[in-house]
Amino acid sequence: MTSIDAPASLSRSTASSPAAGTDPSGARTARSGTGTRTAPSGVDPAELHGPVLAWFDRHARDLPWRRPEAGAWGVMVSEFMLQQTPVVRVLPVYEQWLARWPRPADLAAEPPGEAVRAWGRLGYPRRALRLHAAAVAIRDRHRGDVPSDHGQLLALPGIGEYTAAAVASFAYGQRHAVLDTNVRRVLARAASGVQYPPNATTAAERRLARELLPDDEATAGRWAAASMELGALVCTAKNEDCGRCPVADRCAWLLAGKPAHDGPPRRGQTYAGTDRQVRGRLLAVLRDSPGPVPQSALDAVWDEPVQRGRALDGLVSDGLVEPLDGGRYRLPLT
Ligand code: SF4
């Protein structure tokens, strides 16, 4: 997901890591149901489909955005929220969001600041503004219905390649490579034989994911969800549970003896003391207030004035906070 579109997933806390070796050049080629595939490890990727899909049938979580009643809007909302935020934190906010705004037009009718307020503590609140902007565009350009066309989805504000593919696949059953953090990790290990995918999604990963797609749309959609779920529940970033994994007998990384990661250091996630934390504190003051707040209310939540000022400036320039006359601030009305 770029823009907000940095793949996350069913537990889309970031877990991507560097790794070499996802470039399949030089690997043996393997024949599968969707054509010639490359598998640096010697594992035939097509052999992954059956076990992973069968495992998914037995172990998939019952999540509200997977139910038929969620519709395309529910899928889209979940995809925005799940980027960089784990399922357990998303669930209550998702439920409240859909109850309040069951259609894109319902959200579009309210000020963007209400989306920021309802976003609560999900983090990375620019996603709320982008989801609001997407709802406005859906109302204005698509008569209020989330488009099914991948290109039209991609043209919506805040939607990048990952989200467009995810919505088209999960909501409309289309055949797209849905390459989120969890899927990337599963493919890196099971097919490419390395512990972690690169920090940023590469062309080689996209090619491999496309090559791995089952031929028919229905199976491709299930494969996207199933491989994502496997990464979220079993092949996790730090504690992969190979004993419960349906592809343990053909996982390239496991078969190679789990060679240690030898790429660049993995990106860490720090929060305490960062500008992100200050922004979160400032925004919480505004979310909790029904109207504008004075500067003094913001000053009270962070002692260090230079960092506080920088964080507030950032919120204003991001459109998350609106400065008013008299040193007051509020969530954006427009
Ligand atoms: S066998 Fe282990 S490392 Fe390989 S895909 Fe399964 S959980 Fe991940």
Image: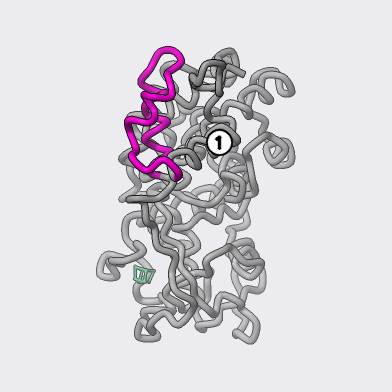
- For residue 225, above or below residue 112: below
Q: Name the residue under label 1.
A: 171
Query: Which segment is the magenta one?
Result: 277-306
Query: In the image, residue 45 lies at what x, y percent?
Result: 52, 71
Looking at numbered disc 1 in the image, what kind of residue is underneath it?
Answer: Ala
Residue density around tag 1, few if under 14, some if 14–19, many if 20 or more, within 10 Å: many
Left or right: where does residue 182 sit relative to residue 30? left
Front in this rendered view, residue 202 or 254: 202
Q: Can residue 330 be seen?
A: no
Q: Which residue is drawn at 49% across and 29% down?
A: 74
| Image quadrant containing the C terminus | top right
**Colour scheme in the image?**
one colour
Q: Is residue 300 magenta?
A: yes
Q: Which residue is drawn at 55% across and 14% down?
A: 110
Front in this rendered view, residue 188 or 13: 13
Front in this rendered view, residue 250 or 7: 7
Report the magenta stretch's main SS: helix
Q: Residue at x 57, y 44 (%)?
A: 4
Q: Residue at x 43, y 39 (%)?
A: 308
Q: What element carries label 1?
A: helix
Query: In the image, residue 8 lies at what x, y percent?
Result: 47, 50
